[in-house]
Structures are given as structure tokens and as C-alpha cells.
Amino acid sequence: MVIDVDRIAELSKLIIPQEKKQVFEKHMTEIVAMADVLSMVADEEISTSDRFALLRADAVHESGISPNDIINNAPCFENSCFCVPKTVE
């Protein structure tokens, strides 16, 4: 595969000095070759259950803390809302 360093630089808005283009081309060729190896993996042998992490069921649990304890522990609580510092002008 031919790597067009000038085209990659143009598309990515990079300025690649002439003396580094050959090194850049070598590295890009190695990256593409590594990606090509991934396409050779027989993914039919991998079951779908191995591909995804198992998720736990959503469940409501009592925390043992009353809403009043939370409100009383808040630095600022007005009009049924927690007050927080303004972060955006």
C-alpha cells in the first residue's frame, strides 16, 4: 500500500517537514500493516457473549440516609434546590 504523506498532511492540517516525510511514511505503513493483521482474525470463532461486558440489572436500594439529612448537610439549599457555584458566564 502506498501512503501519500502530502495528502495525509493536507487532510489533517499538519505541517510535516520534508526531512521527516520518509519517517512519517514508514510509521504510517507500519500502522496500516498492523490494522491489516486485525482483519485476518477469524471473528466467527468468538461468541457474541465474549464480545460484550455483562451488565447488572438496575435496582433501587435504600441508602439509609433520609432526605432531610442530605438537605441539612448541603452548604446551600433554597427553594427546594441545591445551590452550586456558577461555572459559566
Image (cartoon, helix red, strand yellow):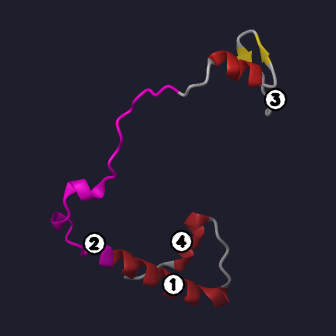
Q: Which amino acid does label 1 sit on?
A: His
* Residue occupying the far front of the picture: 64
Q: Which residue is drawn at 37% across and 74% down?
A: 35
Q: Which amino acid does label 3 sit on?
A: Lys
Q: Nearer the viewer, residue 28 or 61?
A: 61
Q: Distance between the residues labelled 2 and 3?
A: 49 Å
- Report the residue marked by disc 3: 86
- Report the residue marked by disc 4: 8
Q: Is residue 51 magenta?
A: yes
- Report the residue marked by disc 1: 27
Q: Distance between the residues labelled 2 and 1?
A: 19 Å
Q: Which of 74 and 21 is in front in this view?
A: 74
Asked which quadrant contains residue 43, the reply is bottom left
Q: How far apart are marks 4 and 3 (CA)?
A: 42 Å
Task: State the mark number for residue 54.
Answer: none
Q: Provide residue 74's location: percent of width, then percent of height.
A: 76, 24
Asked which quadrant contains residue 20, the reply is bottom right
Q: Provide residue 64's location: percent of width, then percent of height.
A: 56, 25
User: Which mark is in front, 2 or 1?
Assistant: 2
- At mark 4, the secondary structure is helix
Q: Distance between the residues labelled 4 and 1?
A: 13 Å
Q: What residue type is labelled 2?
A: Ser
- Report the residue marked by disc 2: 39
Asked which quadrant contains residue 88, the reply is top right
User: Which mark is in front, 4 or 1?
Assistant: 1
Q: In screen coordinates, is 21 left or right of 72? A: left
| Residues under numbered marks 3 and 1 in contact, where contact means CB atoms less than 8 Å apart | no
| Residues under numbered marks 2 and 4 in contact, where contact means CB atoms less than 8 Å apart | no
Q: Earlier in the sequence, mark 4 or mark 1?
A: 4
